[in-house]
Amino acid sequence: MFDAFVNQKLEPLIERLAELEAEIEDIRRRAENHNRIGVIDQVDPATGLCKVKHGDLMTPWVKYMSPSAGEISETRHPSAGEQCLLINYGGGDGSAHSVALCGLISDQFPPASTEAQLHRRTYPDGTQSSYDHASHTLSWQNGQTSVTASQELIELAIQAVKLTLTPQTALLTIGAVGMLLDAQGVHFTGPKVDHQGRVISTA
């Protein structure tokens, strides 16, 4: 009789403890699913959606983050194989309420710069742009065409043609031929200089 009385009094507490245990397990599960490292598997640039593989699982189509998406907008689509942080803001098991925060460095996609002062962006075709804030130098290169700009000069090179501008001078060179403009005048260099077909200087 005493045991039955105790059990009767403890029954609501036991039920409540069971409920709390289930709630704690649900919170633990949601916490484990909240953030995961994943790899971009597919990208749909037209919709701004991607699928992310994490472990043995694959998300449905979810959004991926851009550098900015407001009145000032910048788009950078992720690449297949790019690592990302999968943020499951819904906390569910299906990853339907998730977003992919891209840009994690990996063996497949190492950093474009290993120097702290150098910000560099590279493209699949080999084009790259960079800014070195220690030397105040901005660079852009696309094949044989390059532009370099610093506080002292601007240099444009297209194959064998190079134009260098400084606050005091302008120098144009094509192979061994050069023309320098400065405060003293115009200076030519090269194997031959002519004016309207008349040779006025030879090397």
Image (tube, rainbow, N blue to C red):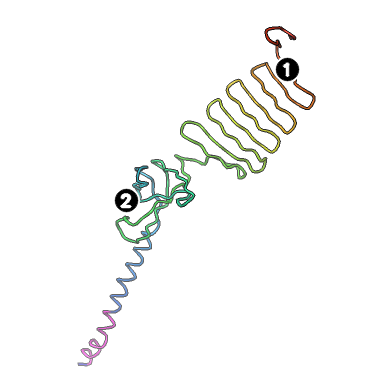
Secondary structure of the residue carrying numbered label 1: strand
Please tell me whether the stretch drawn in magenta is mainly helix, strand or loop: helix
Rendered view: 109 above or below 28? above
The image position of residue 159, as x and y in percent, is 58, 22
| Nearest the eye: 152 or 99 | 152
Rendered view: 192 above or below 108? above
Q: Residues within 10 Å of mark 1 (few under 14, many from 20)?
A: some
- Disc 1 residue type? Phe
Of the numbered discs in the image, which one, if any, rests on residue 144? Answer: none
Residue 156 is left or right of residue 128, and the answer is right
The image position of residue 165, as x and y in percent, is 68, 30
Q: Which residue carries the number 1 mark?
A: 188
Looking at the image, how many numbered discs can be counted on the residues?
2
The residue most toward the bottom is 1
- Disc 2 residue type? Thr
The residue most toward the top is 198
At 75% from the left and 19% from the top, the residue drawn is: 187
Quarter-of-image position of residue 87: bottom left
Residue 166 is left or right of residue 103, and the answer is right
Rendered view: 117 above or below 7? above
Secondary structure of the residue carrying numbered label 2: loop
The image position of residue 198, as x and y in percent, is 71, 7
At 62% from the left and 44% from the top, the residue drawn is: 117
At 64% from the left and 38% from the top, the residue drawn is: 137
Quadrant location, the C terminus: top right
Magenta region: 2-15
Q: Which residue carries the number 2 mark?
A: 59
Q: CA distance from mark 2 to mark 1?
A: 66 Å
At 60% from the left and 31% from the top, the residue drawn is: 147
Rendered view: 65 above or below 167? below
Quarter-of-image position of residue 193: top right
Quadrant location, the N terminus: bottom left
